Image (spheres, helix red, strand yellow):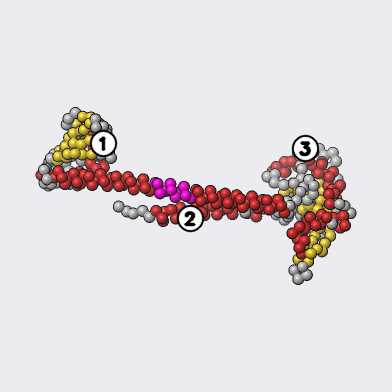
Amino acid sequence: MASIDLRKSTAAAGRRFFAWWLGELSAVFTPAGSLSLAPFANALVLDWRGHELRLARRKGKRETPLAALPLEYPAEREIEHARALFRRGGGRAIVLRFPAETGLRRAVPLPLAAERNLRQILSHEMERLTPWPAEAVYFSAEVAERRAAGRELTAQLAVISAAVVAPVTARLRQWGLAPTALELAAAEGDGTDAGARLFGKDLPVPAAGRRHGRLLAAAAAALVLFWLGCGTLHYWRQHRIDALEAQLASARSKAEHAEVLRVEFARLSGSDPNLVNRPPGAVPLIVLLEALSALLPDESWLTELHLGHTGIELSGYSQDAAALIPLIERSPYFTDVKFRANLVRDPQLRMDRFQIGAALRAAKGEAP
């Protein structure tokens, strides 16, 4: 019997599982799922131009003009058209962008240590740096340059007054086109640059604490995946081992049954010369025994076996002796299978005692 190396099979299963698990883990930490302060790469852009909004579809760094939507008394069909453009693009984001001249930009030198709480520090300094307090503006703060030697950095501050933004966002919300993000276009060019993404009271920035919370949640999810992965791998391995052990038990049962037949044959052959002295051209005895071993169910066994030149008689016990007749008839070696005596139920064994006789089919080349 061929041996089965459980360690190799479970190791292969483990490699397949961990390949899947690492893929799922990488998806948890994918950059696409992280919180970014950068402008949206794919969005419907509403470019504010005073009395109208110019709609464009942004894909990466490219923007494709779509339509114009007047801010004063637009037709319902124009509003519905803008909604349809948003839905057609997958409904990812609506970016409201203001021209550079509506806001203020300035470079702010700060100590290098300020980078950790850059937005908070600039928020405290807002009234000194701009004409407005922090609660009355939308702004972005990014590090433009770091000077490690002098332990200094330069922050780029972009600001727009909430008084400019509020009337436009109120109108958009009324139309069902509430902006997902707010941007201030770059000073150079014609205003199509994505510029800076701004945050404020109704468009809050993903603060450091929230980002850390997301990372902690992602780490917790990864830990849960790890433990689930370990448990799943253990279950997978155990299921595989159980299946292999079931196969081994079945093979062992068949081998033991064959061994019983062999021992029984050795015991009976001394009293029945026909078991040994087979006529020329007859079906080999080993073939007949293998056929009987394959046909008889595991819950049946023989106590006597008499083999003649033209037939065979079997005696033994079975839980369902009546089912043995059709089983033996399936063999190409036996025909005219029938009971030689009535079935007797053994009350102690709770099994049927049977006596079955069958004629041997003529082997090829043997006269009937």
Work out whether 354 lies above or below 185. Answer: above
Label 3, secondary structure: give it. Answer: helix
Residue 219 position within the rendered picture, expressed as x and y whole percent measured from the top left: 61, 52
- The residue singled out by tag 1 in the image is 327
Residue 200: x and y in percent read 79, 49
Q: Residue at x 76, y 64 (%)?
A: 112
First of labels 1, 2 by sequence position: 2
C-alpha separation, residue under disc 1 versus residue under disc 2: 45 Å
User: Which residue ends up furthest to the right in the rendered image?
Assistant: 131
Under mark 1, the amino acid is Leu
Q: Quadrant of residue 107?
A: bottom right
Q: In 3D space, how far apart are the residues under numbered discs 2 and 3 (Cα atoms)?
A: 58 Å
Q: Residues within 10 Å of mark 2 (few under 14, many from 20)?
A: few
The percent position of residue 32, horizontal first and vertical second, equals 65, 53
Question: Magenta segment, which residues?
Answer: 233-243
Q: Residue at x 77, y 37 (%)?
A: 77
Residue 167 visible to the viewer: yes
Crowding at dot 3, Cα within 10 Å, few <14 / some 14-19 / many 20+, comes out as few
The residue at the point 51 percent across, 54 percent down is: 18
Is residue 5 inside the magenta stretch? no
The residue that mark 3 highlights is 77
Q: What is the three-letter code of the residue carrying label 3? A: Arg
Q: Amino acid at mark 2?
A: Arg
Residue 244's label in the rendered image is none
Name the residue tied to disc 2: 15
x and y percentages locating residue 119 in the rendered image:
78, 56
Pair 1/2: label in front: 2
- Of residues 160 and 367, the one drawn nearer to the viewer in this rendering: 160
